[in-house]
Amino acid sequence: MGRKLLLTHINVPGIQSYSVYKEQGGYRSVDKALKSMSPEDVVEEVKKSGLRGRGGAGFPTGMKWSFLAKPEGVPRYLVCNADESEPGTFKDRYLMTHIPHALIEGMIVSSYALGAHTSFIYVRGEMMPQIRILEKAIAEAKAAGYLGKNILGSGYDLELYVQPGGGAYICGEETALLESLEGKRGNPRIKPPFPAIAGLYGCPTVVNNVESIAATVPIINDGGEEYAKIGIERSTGTKLISAGGNLAKPGVYEIELGLPVEEFIYSDEYCGGIANGKKLKAVVAGGSSVPILPANLITKTIKGEARLMTYESLADGGFQSGTMMGSGGFIAFDEDQCIVRNTWNFTRFYRHESCGQCSPCREGTGWMEKVLYNIEHGRGTMNDIDLLWDIQRKIEGNTICPLGDAAAWPVAAAIRHFRDEFEWHINHAQEAQNRNYGLAHYADPLEVVTES
């Protein structure tokens, strides 16, 4: 049984409330940090832990904090990115729904470390139930003396606010999020300057993901070195995974980094194998934006080594034969799934969510959707496959924010690994249209029973 740090008390009745959360040891990290540690000490522990951003990029959290500018007389801000909109990813929503105080506690500790006295949780606009849950949890924490003026008599002040998002996937990009938080259209900013220098309202700002911030709680409670003992090499600690698609047991799982991918898919402790006894065809390991891998490459690397649930092992082989941990949206496709149809569906999403600021993304996502539609609906030609490849190549790396890359990578990987399926659609147009193949379910099913 893998070790749990964030979901340890997930099945405790009433854990959503302050009183039960406190009884289970909640807010110990705030007591410890404010009473016996300096802000610099907290930052140092996060550095020692090796914690990497859990929102997708995997950048070392402590290092990111250390970049924060500290000019005299200028406020600093911490903003939690809870705009979880990546298809296939729902672990942050799960955490906010069931253990909201874990995020609130992490926000207090992290804000203290950064010298922020006003912090925000920017929540995806469609998550109104979670927004109400967080607002209630903040009110409970404030009533208990953990927010507001002079917290625990330490002299440290902090106000925490929940901000509904703009209902746009692009607002998950940190600078677009800051634009939206300021009341503007959520378009990404050109960097530099980076948010650590000029972020919210032009002031030094750190933007971290929900899971990243919640992970600071066990780091401060147990120490950064203890946290770093979990996992393998540069992939330390535990990770929440949103498991969906054609799995026997979809849901949210907390794994120790370093778990073999094959064990995660097939063991009864986790996903329980492929639903209905079918065979695994492919996996999107980190949300819709990362390269898809066929079954043989997701379970083993090209060297024949077992593929592990780590940042390094999943990426082994580069984009030719590897993928990314990403946001942890693990989508499994069984043997009956159509790669062309699923790729078209992803591309529809990115075309719809492009902010339109950059021509390669604005025009390119639309062209990819049209070409994939034609292939899927029996109107494609062999030249369309090369056209798709050319379009995605001209989008990648040519946009202000990573949405262009996120739209290009799935198309490139699908062609790279499943070109024969694209060719079959073109050569058997009528049969492809009549065939009853499926579209994998990779939404965010909160009703899913999660084994933890």
Image: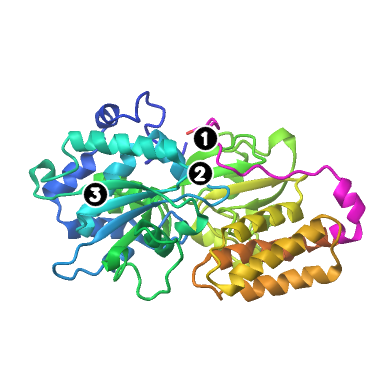
Residue 392, picture quadrant: bottom right
Q: What element carries label 1?
A: loop
Q: Does the magenta stretch include residue 448?
A: yes
Look at the numbered discs 2 and 3 and tell me whether their residues touch, using CB distance below 8 Å. no
The residue indicated by pointer 1 is 446
Q: Residue 109 carries which label?
A: 3
Principal SS element in the magenta part?
loop
Q: Is residue 334 left or right of residue 32?
A: right
Kind of residue at badge 2? Phe
- Between disc 1 and disc 2, whose residue precedes? 2
Near mark 2 (Cα within 10 A), the count class, few <14, some 14-19 or many ≥20, is many
Mark 2–mark 3 Cα distance, whole angstroms, equals 24 Å
Between circles 2 and 3, the one closer to the viewer is: 2
Q: Where is residue 329 in the image (x, y as percent from the top left)?
A: 55, 49
Amino acid tagged 1: Leu
Viewer-side residue, 192 vs 252:
192
Per the rendered image, the range of residues in magenta is: 424-451
- Residue 352: x and y in percent read 61, 57
Say whether marks 1 and 2 touch (CB < 8 Å).
yes
Say which label, 2 or 3, has the lower sequence index: 2
- Answer yes or no: is residue 255 visible: no
Q: Distance between the residues labelled 1 and 2?
A: 8 Å
Residue 90, disc? 2
Residue at position x 73%, y 69% from top? 388
Residue 285 in the image, given as x and y percentages of width and height: 58, 53
Question: Which label's residue is closer to the chain start, 1 or 3?
Answer: 3
Badge number at residue 75: none
